[in-house]
Amino acid sequence: MKNTFQTISPIDGSIYLEREMANANSIEQALEKTNAARRQWRDTPLEERIAICRKALQYILDHEQEIAQEITWQMGRPIRYSGFEITKGFKERAEYMMDVSQKALSDIHAGEMPGFQRFIRREPLGTVFVMAPWNYPFLTSINAIFPALLAGNTVVLKHSGQTPLCAERYAAAFRVADLPKGVFQYLHLSHEQVGKVIADERIDYVAFTGSVPGGKAVQLAANQRFISTGLELGGKDPAYVRADANLESAIENLVDGTFFNSGQSCCGIERIYVDEKLFPSFVEGFVEMTKKYKLGNPLHEETTLGPMVRVSAAAFVQKQIDEAVAKGAKALIEPNHFPRHEKGTPYLAPQVLTNVNHDMAIMREETFGPVVGIMPVKSDAEAIQLMNDSQYGLTASVWSKDVEAAIQIGERVETGTWFLNRCDYLDPALAWTGVKNSGKGCTLSVIGFEALTRPKSFHLRTND
């Protein structure tokens, strides 16, 4: 009997697709193929590796409309936004990493010394095992896949069971681009099988994006061997609106940063601290703009807020809201304002909470849904203390006209990325990293290649 899994669409609860899980034989074949392909790919000139990746990128861009439909059906993002993941973020990151690969992977010369040549060369690790999530299925996976291939590694991809078509799209793109056989492969795996793959000697690095418990499991498996991991985990990202902020811009951008993708973003805004002088006006404007969202079928162009990925995810968010209200929080959005909102379904109305504090889970634990808590603060010092009062540190933002003050505050906030007057964006030229339970390691930028290569020193006496 075949061992299969089903992807349930949050749009209507239907079975969108069914796929066969990998078995011991298919896993062994994949690992053997990738092992056999390593030398050829490593020896392929970087210019050829870049050309192949560019062809693969073009395939994805050429099929943007079909892929957008697949994303929406698999994880529920409104169709009006799904294509943007491909044409904007995916394209931008892929192109940037290709453009800087020559610089990032070039030899590092140790300086002139008579009679000697001395340099450090970056060598590929071997095989990179990429584990990608469903919430931004192409944006998260491109962070590791293209840089790993550009660096001369082979890649095995395990994509989320919610978005398995993304893995298949990558495979199709690389076939069209004439990537040598075995260099890229994907496997549909169970948690138990993931552990066995990580334990295999043919895997040299693990790039994981997902939950903190998932990251701990990956790290535990990798600890049995001398391999490194890159872990991009959870977030409880804060924003601080100072008294000198452009109120209209702060409201517009923070509403979007909170509710885009139904709040299902590791770097989405989950808590906001507002100078007490602006607090009433900020909250009023934030609620007014939130009410303009249209919750509905994500296949309809007018929908701006789609369902959450599954019923259990919506129930988790609602539980956090209910617990906060029971402790004194004030819910400012009447769910009935959004007719599509319905308990027991993934369709969850957005919510804005005030009278919140850090005794509530809604202000301390990752929510990953369309809700935000807003608190007034009296000073920069109080805002910094509250922003740092978290087990997470992925991104944080400040909204102000004072650039120097923003830098000084940012130096004291425990976070991987610090924003001024923007949020919820990954600039591929900058290192994407987190602190505390938001993970370890780095992707993107020239620094992102470091974890995917090992340095090898050449010390050559030339006057013998």
Image (tube, grey):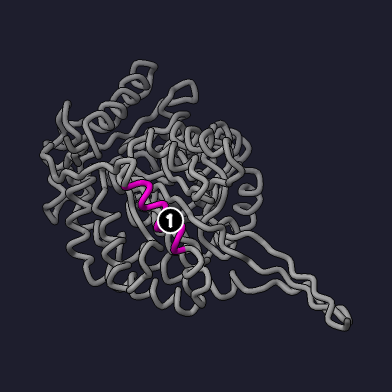
Question: Where on the picture, by quarter, is residue 339?
Answer: top left
State whether residue 49 appears in this view.
yes
Between 403 and 108, the one lying in front of the other is 108
The residue pinned by badge 1 equals 425
Image quadrant containing the C terminus: bottom right
Question: Where on the picture, by quarter, is residue 366?
Answer: top left
In the image: residue 154, left or right of residue 433: left
Residue drawn at the location 56% of the way across and 31% of the way down: 389
Residue drawn at the location 52% of the way across and 68% of the way down: 42
Q: Secondary structure at mark 1?
A: loop
Span colored in magenta: 26-37
Q: Position of residue 457 (x, y in %)?
A: 73, 66
Between 374 and 171, the one lying in front of the other is 171
State whether residue 396 appears in this view.
no
Check disc 1 and give the amino acid type: Tyr
Task: Using the image, determine if residue 315 lies above or below residue 261.
Answer: above
Task: Using the image, determine if residue 38 lies above or below residue 389.
Answer: below
Q: What is the count of numbered marks? A: 1
Residue drawn at the location 56% of the way across and 58% of the way down: 125
Q: Looking at this view, name the residue that lies furthest to the top.
A: 326
In the image: residue 301, left or right of residue 279: left
In the image: residue 230, left or right of residue 8: right
Image quadrant containing the N terminus: top left
What predominant SS class does the magenta segment belong to?
helix
* Magenta segment includes 33: yes
Q: Position of residue 326 (x, y in %)?
A: 34, 16
* Magenta segment includes 381: no
Q: Position of residue 195 (x, y in %)?
A: 44, 36
Q: Position of residue 58 (x, y in %)?
A: 30, 73
Residue drawn at the location 37% of the way across and 53% of the way down: 30
